[in-house]
């Protein structure tokens, strides 16, 4: 029996259990035990649906792990000159990306780590390089509807105190406005988890169809994209705010991860009117 068939068979079995197959007829549907059993069955179904999603849309082989970039410790022109490292209070940090000479985009949840110092042109984050451009943040523009990552609107604009100098190490990235279809392979990048790794790393992720995401997560907030890398913990917590890049353009912002497998990203395109209004009014 194939893996897909096995999971499908388990799904049917779980569904029958959820409907009450084998349940004692004398047991009240409103009893506490019945309610707990139904909740357990629903959780079982969601896990099986997640398994089906991962089987149906496997990532490319090259995306199964972070790929360390060569040249650690040397100020070489990075493959992603738009990347920003955001250093916050108490050792917290986030990822971000340069979208205009004096503007960096990141996740709204990174606002809690302010004041933030923005480092552009970095490769090895643990040792200062000649390519670095460092900026303080003049103003923080968090989306007004943001409350927590799982409810969406996880987007923050940082107005820098000064303009970045465009060169081979530092450059802006444009936005991907065309919707990526399910199965599209995009990429993510960053410096790591609880403590930043010395060198920049990157990986591929596969976009899932929105209806598949909603099947597994029926309460998924609007304007969230789901994608998986095929490796647990990729991307990592410290990569929050980094860009989801499709066709060399910023398509999403890494927001959070579910059970170390499926990553959720804020879809940038629906927020562009808000982004334009903020940048024009500054």
Image (cartoon, rainbow, N blue to C red):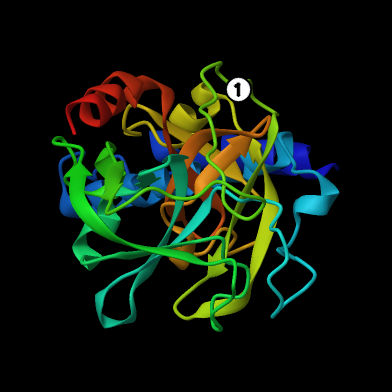
Q: Is residue 181 above or below residue 52?
A: above
Residue 109 locus on image (x, y percent) = 27, 54
Q: Residues within 10 Å of mark 1 (few under 14, many from 20)?
A: some
Residue 140 locus on image (x, y percent) = 19, 49
* Quarter placement of the N terminus: top right
Q: Is residue 221 above or below residue 238?
A: above
- Looking at the image, which is closer to me, 170 or 217? 170
In which image quadrant can residue 64 be found? bottom right
Q: Residue at x 24, y 67 (%)?
A: 113
Which secondary structure lies at badge 1?
loop
Q: Is residue 88 left or right of residue 85?
A: left
- Looking at the image, which is closer to me, 156 or 125? 125
- Looking at the image, which is closer to me, 103 or 91? 103
- Give the mark count: 1
Residue 104 locus on image (x, y percent) = 38, 46
Residue 11 locus on image (x, y percent) = 59, 38
Q: Provide the residue designation for mark 1.
A: 180
Q: Residue at x 75, y 38 (%)?
A: 4
Q: Is residue 75 visible?
A: yes
In which image quadrant can residue 6 be found? top right
Q: Is residue 16 visible?
A: no
* Quarter placement of the C terminus: top left
Q: Is residue 275 left or right of residue 32?
A: right
Q: Residue at x 72, y 34 (%)?
A: 56
Q: Is residue 73 above or below residue 54?
A: below
Q: Residue at x 24, y 43 (%)?
A: 26
């Amino acid at each position: 029996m194939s893996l897909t068939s096995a999971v499908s068979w388990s799904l049917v079995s779980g569904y029958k259990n959820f409907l009450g197959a084998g349940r004692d007829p004398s047991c009240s549907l409103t009893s506490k035990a019945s309610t707990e059993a139904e909740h357990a069955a629903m959780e079982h179904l969601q896990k099986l649906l997640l398994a089906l999603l991962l089987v149906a849309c496997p990532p490319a082989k090259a995306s199964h792990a972070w790929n360390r970039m060569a040249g650690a410790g040397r100020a070489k022109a990075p493959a992603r000159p738009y990347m920003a490292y955001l250093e916050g209070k108490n050792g917290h940090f986030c990822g971000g990306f340069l979208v205009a000479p004096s503007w960096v985009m990141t996740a709204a949840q990174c606002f809690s780590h302010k004041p933030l110092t923005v480092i552009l042109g970095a490769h090895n984050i643990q040792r200062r390089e000649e390519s670095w451009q460092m900026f303080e943040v003049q103003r923080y523009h968090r989306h007004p509807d943001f409350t927590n990552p799982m409810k969406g609107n996880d987007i923050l604009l940082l107005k820098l105190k000064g303009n970045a100098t465009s060169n081979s190490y530092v450059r802006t990235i444009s936005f991907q406005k065309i919707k990526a279809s399910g199965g599209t392979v995009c990429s993510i990048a960053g410096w790591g988890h609880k403590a930043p790794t010395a060198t920049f790393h990157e990986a591929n992720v596969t976009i899932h169809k929105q209806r598949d995401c909603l099947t597994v997560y029926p309460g998924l907030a609007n304007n969230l994209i789901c994608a998986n890398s095929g490796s647990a913990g990729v991307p990592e917590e410290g990569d929050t705010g980094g860009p989801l890049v499709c066709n060399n353009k910023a398509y999403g912002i890494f927001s959070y991860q579910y059970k170390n497998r499926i990553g959720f990203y804020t879809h940038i395109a629906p927020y562009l009117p808000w982004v334009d209004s903020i940048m024009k009014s500054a």
